[in-house]
Amino acid sequence: MPLRVISGTAGGLHLKSPKRHALRPTQDRIRQVIFSSLAEVVPGARVLDLFAGTGSFGIEALSRGAASATFVEKEAEAVQCIRDNLLYCKLKGDVRQADAMAYLDGTPSDRFDLIFADPPYIKSYGPLDDDPLLKKITPFLAPDGLFAWEHYSGGTVQNSPLWEVVRHRTYGETGLTFLRFIRDK
């Protein structure tokens, strides 16, 4: 089934996907649930879409009124798809061809109100508290920023003193956790 923008200025438009690279794009119904719960957060937000693939998270956010979106994807064909999808949807975004983890090793030029990450994941059970992504993402989050992390449903963030679990849901093999970094007040 083709991937589409669910709502907003580009609602209903179908997104292009790379032909040669196996991506695991987030299903429309899961993105719909995600964005329904973020309805008050997205307008005006600065968004970072890591492991961007087709760019569906960032494009959906822009379509719904996000102020800006930065897309980070390492595969050249996927990067071109993101650029084509932005053009087709009449949206603008900053597309960077880079490995997401290497990008997070850099110094942030901006902080983001909303960060989406849908990294490749292995099917394993247990806590995700020590995942390197959690350690690297914090300098990129704005105060009160939200991190939406898609992962295998068997993993959870359980006892992290640094992260507040705002919401955790599972959809078949997909786990989705919304996190807020706990900053010293």
Image (spheres, rainbow, N blue to C red):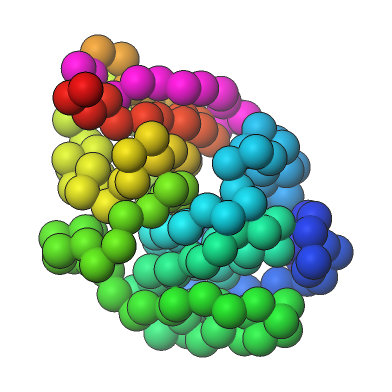
Q: Main secondary structure of the magenta part?
A: strand
Q: Residue at x 61, y 29 (%)?
A: 172
Relative to 180, say whether 21 is above or below.
below
Rendering coords of residue 50 (x, y %): 39, 59
Relative to 65, say whether 40 is above or below.
above
For the N terminus, which image quadrant?
bottom right
Name the image quarter holding residue 97. Answer: bottom left
Q: Which residue is situated farthest in the front direction here? A: 185
Q: Residue at x 65, y 77 (%)?
A: 91
Rendering coords of residue 30 (x, y %): 67, 40
Magenta stretch encompasses residue 162: yes
Q: Which residues are magenta?
A: 160-173
Rendering coords of residue 95 (x, y %): 44, 78
Q: Residue at x 40, y 21 (%)?
A: 165
Q: Residue at x 47, y 57 (%)?
A: 47
Rendering coords of residue 179 (x, y %): 39, 30
For the C terminus, which image quadrant?
top left
- Residue 185 in sight from this viewpoint: yes
Name the image quarter holding residue 124. Answer: top left
**Side of 50 relative to 38 (left or right):** left
- Residue 122 in sight from this viewpoint: no
Q: Nearer the viewer, residue 36 or 129?
A: 36
Magenta stretch encompasses residue 136: no
